[in-house]
Image: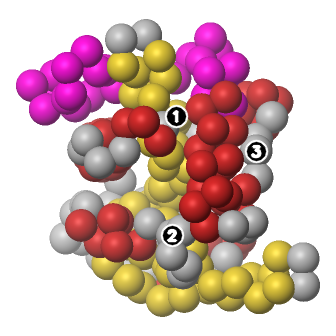
Amino acid sequence: MTSPAHLPPNTTISLANAEDVKALAAMRAAIAQDMTERFGEGAWSAVPSKVTVMKQMRASRVFVARRESKVVGTVRLAAAKPLAFDSSVFTPVNHALYVLGLAVAPQMRNQGLGRLLMDTAKEAASSSGVDALWLDAYDHAAGAGPFYAKCGFRDAGSQPYIVGGDVQTDRVMVCELRATLPDTDHPPLPTA
């Protein structure tokens, strides 16, 4: 994963395991509370249960950052399912992954940990033959679009959605990992 020389002292990044479920749920609850205090109620206010975290771990590759032994950050990579959303705004590729749930504990923000988690996700995806990473970010002050742009993602469009009768918009972003386009003579391989 990420070279220890680039990590803050006493910090590691590795794949999550079943023993991390409780700590991941607690960290994400603290982040939801912090975000709600800073930006008001929104989609970022949702607190995942331990069951939700376990389901996410089964459905994706979950990386965790630990400071000493405490979980202080996370990011997930999941199969990009083009039928689940409008994927036409993304660069066509044979194999893409979706970045989900990048989160850094409030006390660890602005120390480069989010960038290191993204670098870890990009390294893992690239070494697995993935052509691009896709993500969406709230088009709101609480959204991380500017951060993702600094990590090499570019805007590819926007996606409206409805939350409780309120129309929201996500910035849809992409990071090409390889300079390849799909073979147009053959259909793309399934990503699931």
Foreground label between 3 and 1? 3
Front in this rendered view, residue 83 or 44: 44
Residue 136 in view, yes or no = no
In what element is the residue under mark 2? Answer: loop
Disc 3 residue type?
Val
Front in this rendered view, residue 25 or 93: 25
Query: Disc 1 vs disc 2: Cβ atoms closer than 8 Å?
Result: no
Q: Position of residue 137 (x, y in %)?
A: 52, 70
The circle on residue 114 is: none
State the CA–CA distance, disc 3 to disc 2: 17 Å
Disc 2 residue type?
Gly
The circle on residue 62 is: 1
**Residue beneath disc 2:** 143
The quarter holding residue 43 reads: bottom right
Residue at 54 percent of width and 53 percent of height: 100
User: In screen coordinates, is 43 left or right of 73?
Assistant: right
Foreground label between 1 and 2? 2
Magenta residue span: 1-25
Front in this rendered view, residue 75 or 80: 75
Nearest to N terminus: mark 3 or mark 2? 3
Q: Position of residue 80 (x, y in %)?
A: 56, 60
State the CA–CA distance, disc 1 to disc 2: 21 Å
Q: Quadrant of the N terminus?
A: top left
